[in-house]
Amino acid sequence: MAKDKTSRLPGFYNLPLAKRVTRIAEYAALTHEEQQLLGGAMGLSIEQASHMIENVVGLYALPMGIATNFKVNERDVLVPMVIEEPSVVAGAALAAKLARAGGGFFATTDDPIMIGQIQVINLKQPWAARLDVVAQKQALLDAIKEIDPILTRLGGGPRDLKVRVLETTPTGPMLVIHLHYDVRDAMGANAVNSACERLAPMIEQITGGTVLLRILSNLADQRLARVRVTIPETALAFGDFSGEAVAQGIEHAWAFAAADPYRATTHNKGIMNGIDAVVLATGNDWRAIEAGAHAYAARDGVYTSLSRWQRDHRGNLIGALELPLALGTVGGATRVQPLAKMALKIMGIQSAQELAEVVVAVGLAQNFAALRALATEGIQRGHMTLHARQVAMAAGAVGEEITTIAGMMVQEGAIRSDRATTLLSELQTKEGE
Ligand code: MEV
């Protein structure tokens, strides 16, 4: 997306579907084919799918929505989200709108370093073996320097080796070698697994032990993404709730998650609602992201909140989130699934690190939206409004009619298709008078 373009698209929510597609197509300069993909033409052919996994018999579709209003590191960005749950896209967009009052989201990422693990068993003296591997560290790294010439050309490659001894495991002591590998714009599993497999014979020779597992770790804690947001107290007020009450409520809600794993699990699930939706939209491995996130949430031995929410001395709400994000913009499904490729184009993403910065911002936005609702009116009202809009649309309401009919049904507490039809015909009669 060009720098001068804003992600504020007031009224986008109420546009008819076809107009929404045209609006995004204009924004991101999509080709005719890409526009058709957005319009519902299948992104992936069954033929392409049959080359992706085994025993393919069909395709499975999910909705893709666009979260508006995001500003990440001073750049406006429209964020495609793939998710089946209502309210998630609207929640992200609302949070992003409020965040703009404080300048938007500010995110950073570590270098894209992934960890590969090599397990060595059958060692008589694991501590001595550890020292032998450490002594050969440079030779080992040199041996895999050229294993992936493309990555090397792009500035990636092996960076470091760390050697650990697991003294007590159910089958006895073992040595674990961590290969730190810079995978640049890839998620990195293939590169890291290949490098670990290549190192195995050398490690057996050095240690005299047996190498068993050679596999990437999904606890990508060398590849963290972090984000910060400031939401001015004045921007937090809505309905009968003062900005101060909302900020305090969110602080207490966060404190609950910080102290209690039962709440932290749901709190983090809310964060992952946003993260997974963008991860899926871009064809990335959401199971890897989930595994890494929850392991990171328990890194100190107790499962806790991935985010933090606290007020500053002026009463403004400060949010922060940090987690591992092993995301790629090359390789895997990112370039095979046509919609995933287009999602990157809509976001104007140039690198995996830039993608991680947007994704971590969406996670924090989603967390804010959930806590704001939970600490004030509860989440059911928002869900009901969205549900009412869907019922109104199903009854034939368009444009402004959708909001009017949905609002009336919510107020009456009667969200039913027969009621929507009656209200719509009454409204249309009034309009025609
Ligand atoms: C629902 O999908 C997510 C929430 O439960 C998150 C939370 O409780 O923070 C609303």
Image: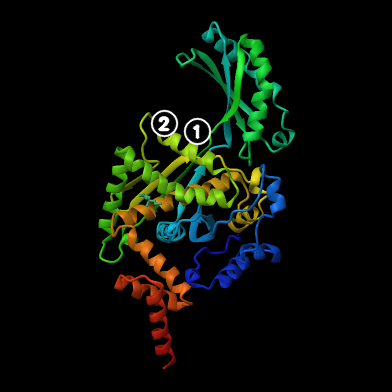
Left or right, 318 with respect to 31, comes to left
Quadrant containing the C terminus in the rendered view: bottom left
Residue that appears at 63% across and 39% down: 184
Q: Which amino acid, mark 2? A: Arg
Q: Provide residue 423's location: percent of width, then percent of height.
A: 38, 80
Residue wearing tag 1: 221
On the image, numbered disc 2 is attached to which residue? 299
Q: Quadrant of the N terminus?
A: bottom right
* Most distant residue in the top direction: 124
Rate crowding at label 2 as few (under 14), some (14 to 19) or many (20 or more) other CA atoms within 10 Å: few
Residue name at image x 68 percent, y 16 percent: 201
Residue 123 in which image quadrant: top right
Q: What kind of residue is marked 1?
A: Asp
Image-based side of 144 in relation to 69, left or right:
right
Q: Secondary structure at mark 2?
A: loop
Identify which residue is drawn at 35% across, 31% down.
302
Disc 1 C-beta below 8 A from ligand 1: no
For residue 14, above or below residue 46: below
Do the residues bearing badges 1 and 2 touch, measured as CB atoms within 8 Å?
yes
- x and y percentages locating residue 50 in the rendered image: 70, 47
User: Where residue 2 sits in the image (x, y, percent)?
Assistant: 61, 61
Measure the C-alpha gap from mark 1 to mark 2.
10 Å
Asked whether residue 81 is in view, the answer is: yes
Label 1 vs 2, first from the N-terminus: 1
Q: Is residue 72 above or below residue 181?
A: below
Looking at the picture, how far across and down is residue 215, in whole percent?
60, 28
Q: Is residue 325 visible?
A: no
Residue 189 shown left or right of residue 362 in the figure:
right
Label 2, ligand 1: CB separation under 8 Å: no
Q: Nearer the viewer, residue 257 or 235?
A: 257
| Helix, strand or loop for disc 1 | loop
